[in-house]
Amino acid sequence: MRTNLRLLNAVQYIGLTLITIGIVTFLYGFFVSGYIMMTSIGIGTVMGAIFIFLMGVFFVATEEMQEKTAKGIKLTQ
């Protein structure tokens, strides 16, 4: 249970950091510099941050479900 919270917190901080960097890069490329390359890098960074966050939440949910389910099927005759 404790590792789930640590993993979720790590994913949140990494996702928040990457999405902030991506938004700043996108805004810089779109409004300030006019470079299409900076804009596309910003969009890619935001999409990567969302992907990392969703995969981290999926891993935490999967681990939580594994802990709560019964192991194996008991057969009686």
Image (spheres, rainbow, N blue to C red):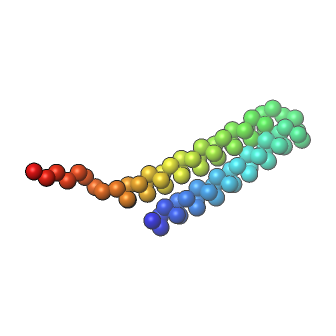
Q: Where in the figure is residue 9, as x and y percent of width and height?
A: 58, 61
Seen from this angle, which residue lies furthest right?
Answer: 32
Judged left or right of residue 4, residue 66 is left
**Residue pictured at 78% horizontal, 37% vertical:** 39
**The quarter of the displayed image where residue 64 is located:** bottom left
Judged left or right of residue 62, residue 19 is right
**The quarter of the displayed image where residue 22 is located:** top right
Q: Where in the figure is residue 27, as x and y percent of width and height?
A: 83, 43
State the residue in front, 71 or 48: 71
Q: Where in the figure is residue 12, as x and y percent of width and height?
A: 62, 57
Q: Is residue 8 above or below residue 23?
A: below
Q: Is residue 35 above or below residue 56?
A: above
Q: Is residue 64 above or below residue 44?
A: below
**Residue pictured at 75% horizontal, 35% vertical:** 40
Q: Where in the figure is residue 56, as x and y percent of width and height?
A: 54, 51
**Residue pictured at 55% horizontal, 59% vertical:** 8
